[in-house]
Image (cartoon, grey):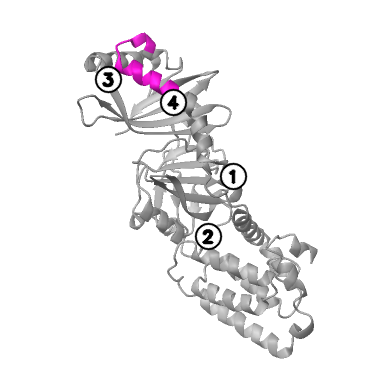
């Protein structure tokens, strides 16, 4: 009973441990019914999974936990039976359903209370499912405060219609809409990350990268193996900061699950972020390629929007100084805002200075505006800004879209990467 309590499943399983006494004590008739239910469950497991709305299966699972915790075991069992009937590939739901069936005949010892022989043979899978259950509940219990947003989203332009943030510690992805009044949380989903955890640094390390990224494309599921499920959204790992730090690897995607799995274990991928197919399909339908930022953090820091604006003030001053220098003809003032180890696709600061000189001569001092400006902050051992804007000269309607990476050196912000992205 104490082991069941340790699962923290809304007190569901401690209640179930004692539910087999008194009026609910097992009988021969109930045991026969249990056997028939198990046979039915096996038959349903062979069916293809039913179409699902994003987040629907998880919400039903949580409702089952709550009912069990309220000692409504029979109602929980009926809902669990329907859930696994609709989603026979939802392995965690199958595990909970099995426990609810077993609780009719005997007290439960733990989540996934299967006989010792099968438990030993499937110890790894059982532990994965227990961790998945705990993480789903942890994220739903530790909801971000209303009106707060991840601290990385300092400023998003109207072109950034949506944004994504991943909290690895909670195995959770949060989907936002960028509205006229700020970021609005649309939905959040359970995810899996790399087998070896986070902080990817080298090719093949099976870790998920941390940082600020952008969705670069939307891969047609017809071109992918079944392993990737409903599709894939690649992100731009390694970004300029990753490259500066010597990180290697590629092919980091947000993608779905194979047909036999509704969800994967918390640590299961080769570095990608993996979602249930209905959840991924919602994201694919929602977000835009190239303009959707994806923040992946060990733990998200949720703050009030007014605090974010205050945090960004010092950087805005530095960006305005750059804009003023770029609009003038003072090359020395402009290059002073770049780091000595600046690198843009192999061009050193010396080589980039020649590019800047040519740009200043070409624009002949015409003022330059920053259109659709966005900047996101990434803080670890350094304080970094990822800045995207359209560079539009006065008198022009359009211009190149550029991305800069700034780093804070003491009290000053300086650029260590700059390049045209569109």
How far, Cα to Cα, is label 2 from label 3? 52 Å
Return the disc, 1 or 3, that comes first in the chain's sequence.
1
Look at mark 1 in the image and give the residue it sits on: 197
Marks 1 and 3, how far apart at CA: 47 Å
Q: Are the residues tagged 4 and 3 within 8 Å (C-beta)?
A: no
| Residue drawn at x 55%, y 51% as measured from the top left | 172
Residue 324 highlighted magenta (yes or no): yes
Magenta span includes 205: no
> Taken as a whole, is the magenta stretch helix, strand or loop?
helix
Say whether disc 1 or disc 2 marks the residue closer to the N-terminus: 1
Q: Would you name the residue on which mark 4 appears?
A: 316
Q: How many numbered discs, if any?
A: 4
Q: Work out whether 16 lies above or below 244.
A: below
In the image shown, does 318 or 174 lie closer to the viewer? 318
User: Which residue reaches farthest bottom?
Assistant: 29
- The quarter of the picture where residue 379 lies is top right
Residue numbers of the magenta segment: 317-333
Indicate left or right for 126 with 45 as reference: right
Give the SS element for disc 3: loop
Q: Is residue 86 above or below residue 162?
A: below
Q: Which residue is mark 2?
A: 263
Residue to which mark 3 is pinned = 367
Q: Secondary structure at mark 1?
A: loop
User: Who's the residue at 34% across and 11% down the image?
Assistant: 331
Q: Residues within 10 Å of mark 1 (few under 14, many from 20)?
A: many
């Amino acid at each position: 009973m104490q082991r069941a309590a340790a699962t923290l499943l809304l007190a569901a399983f401690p209640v179930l441990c004692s539910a087999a006494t008194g009026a609910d004590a097992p009988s021969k008739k109930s045991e026969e019914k249990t056997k028939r239910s198990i046979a039915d469950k096996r038959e349903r497991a062979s069916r293809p999974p039913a179409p699902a709305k994003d987040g629907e299966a998880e919400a039903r699972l949580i409702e089952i936990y709550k009912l069990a915790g309220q000692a409504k075991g029979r109602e929980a069992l009926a809902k669990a039976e329907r859930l696994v009937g609709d989603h026979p590939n939802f392995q965690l739901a199958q595990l909970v359903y099995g426990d609810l069936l077993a609780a009719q005949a005997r007290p439960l010892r733990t989540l996934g209370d299967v006989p010792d022989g099968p438990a030993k043979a499937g110890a790894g899978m059982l532990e994965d499912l227990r961790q998945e259950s705990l993480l789903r509940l942890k994220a739903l219990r530790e909801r971000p405060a209303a009106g707060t947003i991840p601290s990385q989203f300092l400023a998003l332009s109207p072109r950034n219609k949506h944004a994504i943030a991943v909290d690895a510690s909670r195995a959770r992805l949060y989907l936002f809409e960028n509205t006229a009044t700020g970021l609005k949380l649309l939905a959040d989903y359970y995810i899996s990350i790399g087998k070896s955890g986070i902080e990817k640094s080298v090719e093949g390390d099976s870790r998920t990268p941390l940082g600020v990224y952008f969705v670069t494309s939307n891969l047609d599921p017809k071109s992918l193996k079944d392993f990737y499920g409903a599709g894939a959204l690649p992100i731009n790992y390694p970004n300029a900061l990753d490259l500066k730090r010597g990180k290697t690897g590629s092919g980091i995607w947000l993608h779905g699950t194979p047909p036999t799995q509704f969800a994967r274990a918390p640590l299961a991928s080769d570095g990608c972020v993996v979602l249930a197919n209905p959840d991924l399909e919602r994201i694919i339908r929602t977000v835009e390629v190239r303009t959707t930022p994806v923040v992946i953090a060990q733990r998200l820091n949720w703050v009030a929007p007014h605090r974010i604006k205050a945090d960004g003030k010092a950087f805005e001053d530095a960006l305005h100084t750059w804009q003023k220098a770029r609009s003038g003809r003072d090359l020395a003032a402009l290059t002073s805002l770049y780091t000595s180890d600046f690198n843009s696709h192999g061009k050193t600061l010396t080589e980039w200075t020649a590019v800047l000189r040519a740009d200043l001569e070409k624009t002949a001092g015409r003022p330059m505006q920053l259109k659709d400006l966005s900047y996101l902050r990434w803080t670890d051992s350094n304080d970094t800004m990822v800045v995207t804007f359209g560079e539009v000269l006065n008198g022009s309607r359009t211009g190149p879209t550029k991305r800069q990476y700034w780093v804070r050196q003491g009290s000053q912000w300086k650029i260590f990467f700059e390049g045209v992205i569109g």
